[in-house]
Amino acid sequence: MIGRAGQNPTGVQESALDSENRVAAGKQDMLLRVSELKMWFPIQRGILQRHVGDVKAVDGISFNIVRGETLGLVGESGCGKSTTGRAILQLYRPTSGSVLFNGRNLTTIKGGELRHMRRQMQMIFQDPYASLNPRMTVGNIVGEPLEVHNIGDRAERLDRVRELLAVVGLNPYFINRYPHEFSGGQRQRIGVARALAVNPSFIVCDEPISALDVSIQAQVINLLEDLQEQFGLTYLFIAHDLSVVRHISDRIAVMYLGKIMELTDRDELYRNPMHPYTQALLSAVPIPDPAIEEKRHRIILEGDVPSPVNPPIGCNFSTRCPKVMEICKEHEPDFRDYGEGHFVACWLYQK
Amino acid sequence: MSRLLEVEGLETRFFTQDGVVHAVNGISYYLDEGETLAIVGESGCGKSVSVMSLLRLIPQPPGKITGGEVWFEGKDLLKLTDDEIRQVRGNRIAMIFQDPMTSLNPVLTIGYQISEALILHMGMNKEAARKRSVELLELVGIPRAADRLDDYPHQFSGGMRQRVMIAMGLSCNPQLLIADEPTTALDVTIQAQITDLVTRLRDEVGMAIIWITHDLGVVAGLADRVIVMYAGFIVEESAVKDLYADPRHPYTIGLLGSLPRLDEARGHRLTSIEGLPPDLIDLPQGCPFYIRCKYHIERCATENPKLEPVAPGHKIACWVDVRTGRGRTE
């Protein structure tokens, strides 16, 4: 149904592959390749707007996403995870680095060409209250991407919107209602329907469930999983909640202060976290079971995240790291593969 | 341990243009000295309103406490005069809130805000209050406490602000600390710092805590007892271990099933609770969870079950025994 317009390069047979196969076959089927991506925001002062520094929100990160997989991007607030999502979609134009999507470098194209590429990549936002225009009906909101991209005529678009509402579990009868008439979970479904409208192959989910209640969170997670299977979607799933990310992702990247500290398969990350930051982060996540909580050892990190305007010299985590060494304060470690795609940037392993 | 707080049939309503919002619907619970009680529920379940009502902090109008008694240190808090309740607030019972930025006054220094309660409730002079403020900030782990006294809230990070709030809460050695989602706005590593701090202080100072949260994960490592609320009712009350090992109310079971867990196996699907909580203006006649409940029987549609014991220290408000799927009284 959704694939009827035939623009989706990911066929349905794609989703039949299980995730392991997808990752194994990854070398051939790379959807997204991000290299040395930097997104710095200039700080300007005075009446002459002199350039006095930069907020290094994303500071040289590289990763790949295989077609059909979900890459989780976790980190605490201000670590640059949302900026990464936006810089990939060219909602911000990156300072440097490249973003290869289906082999095309998005950072060098613009105008109509970029708009055309955007048909294949969409975004779901965190706040379902702020990301829907309160003066537009649900029909107009979900249909807008179709209008922007000149897909179909009025009647076709209306049919398509009804179909999309049904797909995300809303009654197509709601088409003329306004966002305020819906609950948070339902609004997030509207946001999902809008993202699906143009048949994208790649969706950036930017904290899509953080604003929702627990029981509603589960509804939206299940919906995202179903849609992925149904339409062979690829997700970049950005969240601060490690339990959620572990649940939905195939691979996980851990960000801290503009850099990726560790990237590996979801189970490997939880079984064998190598970076001290990942270890602390995992130990801090509460597990809903008092028997386990009683026995757990928590690594309590001292202090707060430093400012991205003036990140530490050497490793970004060196100011809070419980295992810090002299070299960490002077030189930055490489982001290296320590076997089977387990990437870590830490001097503990780099001799 | 002796009883510290006893809430009987507390009922709070909001009289709005759209109708009467039944925010808290006759809930009863107790708290012993030094005990940590968690109140868990989703937004709009009445967990915050229920504790705000204890201290009569709900805005009136439109809010009104329409029934119940709150016994604390031999007095019914709901019958005290305004002056008397002010002696209890911040002094015997302290409260910390979710968002430390909006609950601190941005134009007053941290030192001033902590001293205020000390001067007011403990009758200290400025000098002594300042000294005590430094001690309190050190107690909650703020580095260079003496220097930071003259800083303003915006000069602190989120976690540090929450520490300041806790320092203010502890300033008058309260018997009871009410923490309303104190870690919800914080990152997980900072959340760990704060829960660690609060449990340490609880053990040192020996105060009781009511911890309000929507996060069943935080509760597991923190509370002695848990109350689960839904649509202004208590639906389950139990010792923390029993609640996770042997939940008896379908809503609690649903909540636990919808939580992704850090230690879960691959390929597990979340069991979400379908539908939405009821409209508090127009509560259903029967059990408020009835329409979303997988276990419901005929009786649930017409009669709202009372909170009744099913095991020692374990109460639920449900007609059904979830282990058999049949009515409990059959």
Image (cartoon, coloured by chain):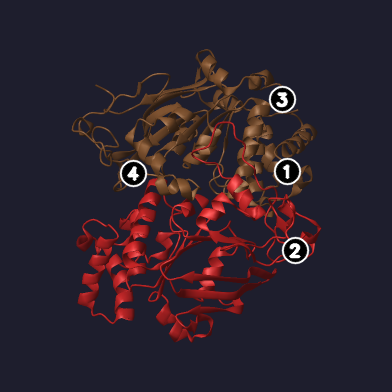
Between label 1 and label 4, give the one nearer the viewer.
4
On the rendered structure, is A85 left or right of B134?
A: right
Between label 2 and label 1, give the one nearer the viewer.
2
Q: CA distance from mark 2 to mark 3?
A: 42 Å
The type of residue carrying mark 3 is: Gly
The image quadrant of residue A342 is top left
The type of residue carrying mark 2 is: Pro
Q: Are marks 2 and 1 on the same chain?
A: no
Label 1 sits on residue? A170
Subunit of label 1: A
Q: CA distance from mark 2 to mark 4?
A: 47 Å
Relative to B294, say whether A258 is above or below.
above
Residue at position x 20%, y 76% in the image: B127
- The chain shown in red is which? B
Label 4 sits on residue? A299
Q: Are marks 1 and 3 on the same chain?
A: yes
Q: CA distance from mark 1 to mark 3?
A: 19 Å
Label 3 sits on residue? A3
The quadrant of the image that shows the N terminus of chain A is: top right
Subunit of label 2: B
Q: CA distance from mark 4 to mark 3?
A: 48 Å
Dot 1 and dot 4 residues touching (CB under 8 Å) = no
Residue A312 spot, x, y in % from top left: 25, 38
Q: CA distance from mark 1 to mark 4?
A: 43 Å
Label 2 sits on residue? B284
Depth check: A241 or B16 in front?
A241
